[in-house]
Image (tube, helix red, strand yellow):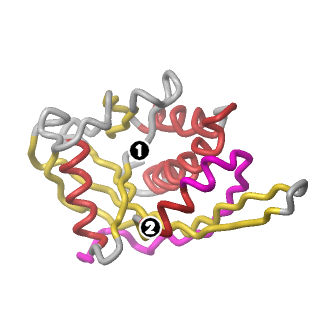
Amino acid sequence: MKETNAKEIYTREERIEFINSDFFYRMKHLVENDRKGEVVFCIIRPNGKIITITCEEYPKGIYRIPSGGIGYGEDIENAVFREVKEELGLEVEIIDYIGWLKIEFQYKDEKIKINEKVIFYSYLFILKEVGGMLLSGALDDEISEVREVDLKELADIVESLNNIEGKWRDWGKFRYVTSKAILDYLTNTRYG
């Protein structure tokens, strides 16, 4: 990892108790078969705004900080550059490596005596856009819309993730944790 401007590395452990078995088992399958974790990347545009994203299947009006999977055997820094290019079509420079979140996903069902957990790592980065063409240069079409925000708007977006109800609740709690870590870092550093 390149030397960064961060004074200390952010490390935190979180536990999310899922109520939706489908989402829990989807995450468990991803961890066991596809990825060792994810990179969460906060991209600061030349205008100083922060990129947030949404996808067609998300609840209406919900945005988040972008992220992407780290394959088994893949270098974390390489995953950052690959995911940014694939999802957003941008070239970036790493400004800060914030640190990582160790997230324990839990699912319990007392009626049928299930008590399972899976550990997932999110590696957090602050990036500066240096080239490319937003979305039109993307290698996949997963992202349906980008919204550029300031810190106050990001705080509202983060809070909305924490308040999602229904089938997207567990996903919202997960994305709240990662997006909140980015927001806290930005608020408490030179970016705030």
* Image-based side of 142 in relation to 22, left or right: left
Among the two numbered marks 1 and 2 on one chain, the one whose residue lies closer to the N terminus: 2
Out of 83 and 99, give the one closest to the viewer.
83
Location of residue 67 with respect to 31 vertically, above or below: above
CA neighbours of label 1 inside 10 A, class few (<14), some (14 to 19), many (20+): many
* Image-based side of 190 in relation to 107, left or right: left
- Three-letter code for the amino acid on which mark 1 is drawn: Ile
Instruction: Give the image location of residue 65, x and y in percent.
Output: 41, 44
Marks 1/2: CA–CA distance: 24 Å
Residue beneath the point at 41% across and 61% down? 38
| Contact (Cβ within 8 Å) of mark 1 with mark 2 | no
* Image-based side of 24 in relation to 32, left or right: right
Out of 20 and 179, give the one closest to the viewer.
20
Residue beneath the point at 34% across and 29% down? 147
As drawn, which residue projects farthest toward the front?
Answer: 112
Say which residue label 1 marks. Answer: 65
- Quadrant showing the N terminus: bottom left
Residue beneath the point at 39% across and 56% down? 40
The kind of secondary structure element at disc 2 is helix
- Three-letter code for the amino acid on which mark 2 is drawn: Asn
Instruction: Give the image location of residue 103, x and y in percent.
Output: 59, 65
The kind of secondary structure element at disc 1 is loop
Which region is colored magenta? 1-26
Q: Is residue 24 magenta?
A: yes
Mark on residue 33?
2
Q: Nearer the viewer, mark 1 or mark 2?
A: 2
Q: Is residue 153 magenta?
A: no
* Residue 68, image quadrant: bottom left
* Residue 2, image quadrant: bottom left
Instruction: Give the image location of residue 178, x and y in percent.
Output: 51, 53
